Amino acid sequence: MNRLLRGATIVWVALRYGLDELVLNSFQHRWLHLLARIISIGRDLRAPRGQRLREALERLGPIFVKFGQVLSTRRDLLPPDIADELALLQDRVPPFDSKVAVATIERAFGKPVGQVFVSFEQVPVASASIAQVHFATLRDRQGQLHEVAVKVLRPGMLPVIDKDLGLMRMMAGWLESLSSDGKRLKPREVVAEFDNYLHDELDLVREAANAAQLRRNMDGLDLVLIPEIYWDFCHPEVMVMERMHGVPISQVDKLREAGVDIPKLARDGVTIFFTQVFRDGFFHADMHPGNIQVSLAPETLGRYISLDFGIVGSLTEIDKEYLAQNFTAFFRRDYKRVAELHIESGWVPPETRVNDLEAAIRTVCEPYFDRPLREISLGMVLMRLFQTSRRFNVEIQPQLVLLQKTLLNIEGLGRQLDPDLDLWSTAKPFLEKWMLDQMGPQRLWQELRAQAPHYAKLLPALPRLLYEQLHRRSGTSAPSELQELLQEQRRTNRLLQALLYGGGGFVLGLLVMQLVVRVQLF
């Protein structure tokens, strides 16, 4: 009964905001076109379709707001006007009762909140669709006091999520079976991806682990502060971390008055992102302005403060190579190479004609070169490549969609801070270093070190293996065995000489190759 009522509410909101117009017009069945006309009688649908969709999701509640946020990252599936409007969704969710938050903390740790924290602020400082945050003070095992932020999961989320996800799956199935565009939009896959996001965010220990990994990776960079996690006070429903003191990055005038170098701040943001992507392959994938502050403390003035680590992205070495080569090929206007990379990655069917894909990519990318290099948006380039690839049945990988969404966030933020930001010149050192590391002596040395344990186990066994081989040949005469050993020794000497000469030539070749790459690629 509850599911039926919820379904009726969703249908009523969809009709009120004209969402039926977004889907019924693409259906092939004539009776559905007639139904769309009848339903639209008497409604004011003058607002753009993207705005109506966003307002409907806000009306349906926190889960649908979160769904719209995740859906906005799938620019490879959505029309640009709808994706842009969904990107405006914010967690405009009122906080839940502080007594409920206290009860959640006490249930998680099995004791009164007064025994967990020295002090606990009842009024939350932030509230979102999944959780809300309270400030507190705790005493660690050494007796030291620490100011902390306590993130508490919104109660009763799992049943609500499972119920709404069940309805979403059902509607996705209808859309896929009735709409001519249903299969291309892959609604079931989008809902499944949303399911993964939500259930990951419902586990605050997972978010704490993400924060700890990013903090470890960024240690020593001196550009970003990431809160310390207090593991003795973490639970799937509660996460306790260091309280960070900063100013929201959107308050540019206040930052400038405090003496923050705004153009440097913009460059640092790009540096942090590309370091996480190309050096670590592990990046904060939700870097919108609401999750970023700037420190004004004298010892850390102008450093970024990252918050909210529920969504992170990770890249394999293959992903990083694909991205680096795509970017460098694009800036060299080598569209054929971009097309070949799409095919080599396996995301385009192998029977795709390189010339056709090259022409499509050229059509999308060439207009960018009428602008100064600093005005070229790498995020838009990546997005257009994804959209073009859709025509060729490309299966876009989720980690690259997250990357594209985050890159758009970083670019937008950077250029709000500094309209003259040259993103390419900032990204270039990371791409250059990564390319050289892939083909230089350092990579060879890393591979040798990785294989060293295997060879260390093999070498002590060589005398035994040689003895066993000679023993198996014991039926032959001693002089013939000696002759065979001498011949084997000569062959071994020749092989060692060849390896020495070849190794020397290989090292010299690598050095020459690095010089060529530096001069030609960059």
Image: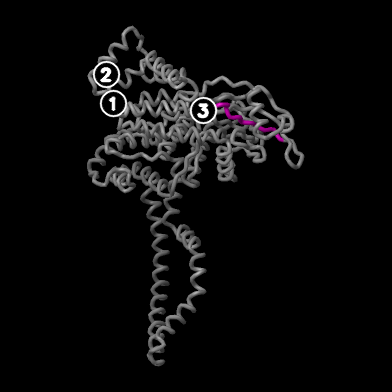
Q: Which quadrant of the view contains residue 496?
A: bottom left
User: What residue is disc 2 on?
Assistant: 32
Mark 2 or mark 1: name the one nearer the start of the chain. Answer: 2
Could you tell me residue 389's position as x and y percent?
30, 38
Mark nearer the N terminus (3 vs 1)? 3
Q: Which mark is residue 178?
A: 1
**Magenta stretch: includes residue 367:** no
As rendered, which of 366 and 341 lies closer to the eye? 341
Q: Distance between the residues labelled 3 and 2?
A: 33 Å
Task: Judge by depth and name the residue closer to the eye, 61 or 297.
Answer: 61
Give percent across and percent down for residue 469: 42, 81
Element class at badge 2: helix
**Residue drawn at (64%, 31%) of the image:** 150
| Residue on which the image places disc 3 | 159
Q: Residue furthest top?
A: 42
Residue type, mark 1 in image: Leu
Q: Classify the position of the N terminus by image quarter.
A: top left
Instruction: Say whether marks 2 and 1 touch (CB < 8 Å).
Output: yes
Circle 1 SS class:
helix
Relative horizontal placement of residue 12, taking residue 123 as reference (left or right)? left
Q: In x, y percent, where is residue 495?
A: 39, 75
Mark 2 is on which residue type? Leu
Residue most extreme to the right:
143
Residue range in magenta is 146-160
Three-letter residue code for mark 3: Pro
Q: Are marks 3 and 1 in contact (CB under 8 Å)?
A: no
Disc number lying in front (3 or 2): 3
Distance between mark 3 and mark 1 Cα atoms: 29 Å
